[in-house]
Amino acid sequence: MSVAVLYAVTGLGLFSLGLYALIVRAHLLRKILALNIMGSGVFLVLTALARRAPDGPPDPVPHAMVITGIVVAVAATALALVLLRRVVETTGQPRLPDPDSE
Amino acid sequence: MTPRGAAPWLRFSVALLLVGMFAALAWVLLGLPPRSAGLQPQVAAQMAVSGVDHPVTAVLLNFRGYDTLLEMAVLLLACLGVWSLSPAVPPTDETPGAMLAALPRQLVPLMVLMAGYLLWRGATGPGGAFQAGAVLGAAGVLLLLTGWRLPVRWQGWRLRLLLIAGVGMFVLVALAVVPASGVLLGYPLPVAGTLILLIEALAGLSIGVTLMALFLGGEPGASR
Amino acid sequence: MAIATLLGWALDGLLMLVLLWLAWRVLACKGLFRAVVLFIAFGLVLSLVWVRLDAPDVALAEAAIGAGLTGALLLSTLARLDALDAKQDEDASS
């Protein structure tokens, strides 16, 4: 088992942690943070698997994908944060309405 | 309404499911071949015709140019989404302290220089349009945080032109090389390096301005 | 040589643990401000990880965007939520 695979498993752990928080946390800002952590986990898996090259430079294709991914993630986060602001302005609540408990 | 979010039994079952998912995916990861060069040999073999000397830049701007082109479009769409949701947040009237007012004057020129260097450096080493754009965007955010406001005459078509410059130049180059190479984005080798630098320069500028515009949190100058 | 390898392993192990711990704290700690600051720290540690994985391009992008710009966006949103008086985060459990 190499260090690269361990980093990939760490990325998987980040993804799982983020997904758990995305489901159980109610505050929308916390959900946005959870999505970002999930994305970081996916990036970590990709970059770690690119590092498996034997004694050579790492695979540049996943690196390029992760760089575009980081920029898309920040754009999506900005959009999500504006949506969150609109939800708060409209409903006065920083969470989605829960039909079961109203 | 339960203020503490999901019920305990729900939390427990979600956690159980996710542990199962983690175990299954980890099993797959550990079963992958421990040594694999991936696409690195293919990229290395094609480096001579890419027009640049850095593999990541070659992949981003040449081999997988479509990805980057569409990614620029995604960035533009995110900006459009933000603008359509709300007008820019009215700036507060707080005047920054002496230190905070002086800081960007020292830092922003350096950051612009840094962005230019990263852009130029992208042809041969780590760097390129995304990193340069990120540094430019950070410089813009720093200016906005220290009391600088987008001048009104820049809020109209000038800002919009800067926002679309990256994706616009990308599409123009993609179309312009069709007669020479027969395919979209198939740069002819003698001018590949120049075309990539041209695209990167405008893409970096657009990325920087888009990130700054996203930080404004809405369409500047619009009223609700 | 062996010591350098050992140190490298130790650093890698430490980075992985810190990354997981920071992610858990971001998602579980009380208070949104603390969560956002921890998230910025998470981005910085992640850019160290990119360097360890021989991905300096990704590290540059992460340091500027993941840590800097995302943090600024989150903090400014937090300030606006504060103004709207919607920052109460009662579901903060650990």
Image (spheres, rainbow, N blue to C red):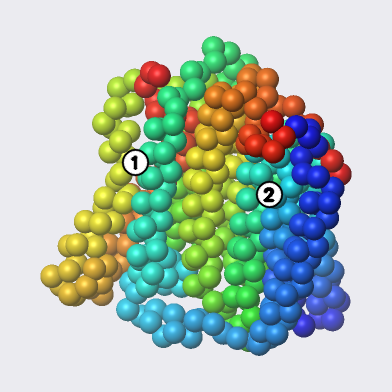
Image mark for residue B154: none
Residue reaching furthest left?
Answer: B179
User: Compared with residue A11, is residue B159 higher up or lower down, i.e. above or below?
Assistant: above
User: Compared with residue B180, is residue A89 higher up or lower down, i.e. above or below?
Assistant: above
Q: Distance between the residues labelled 1 and 2?
A: 32 Å
- Examine the image and state in which quarter residue B163 appears: top left
User: Compared with residue A8, is residue B97 higher up or lower down, i.e. above or below?
Assistant: above
In this rendering, position of residue B173 left or right of residue C8: left
In this rendering, position of residue B177 left or right of residue B9: left
**Chain bearing mark 2:** A
Q: Which residue type does callout 1 highlight?
A: Leu
Image mark for residue B163: 1
Residues tagged by mark 1 and mark 2 found on one chain of the structure: no
**Chain bearing mark 1:** B
Write the residue at 73% across / 75% down. Answer: B24
Task: Tell me the element at label 1.
Answer: helix
- x, y percent for residue B220: 39, 25
Quadrant location of the N terminus of chain B in the rendered image: top right
Query: Which residue does the numbered mark 2 point to in the structure image?
Result: A22
Q: Which residue type does callout 2 highlight?
A: Leu
- Examine the image and state in which quarter residue A52 appears: bottom right
- Examine the image and state in which quarter residue B154 appears: top left
Say if residue B49 shows up in the picture.
yes
Write the residue at 68% across / 24% down. Answer: C86
Labels 1 and 2 touching (C-beta < 8 A): no
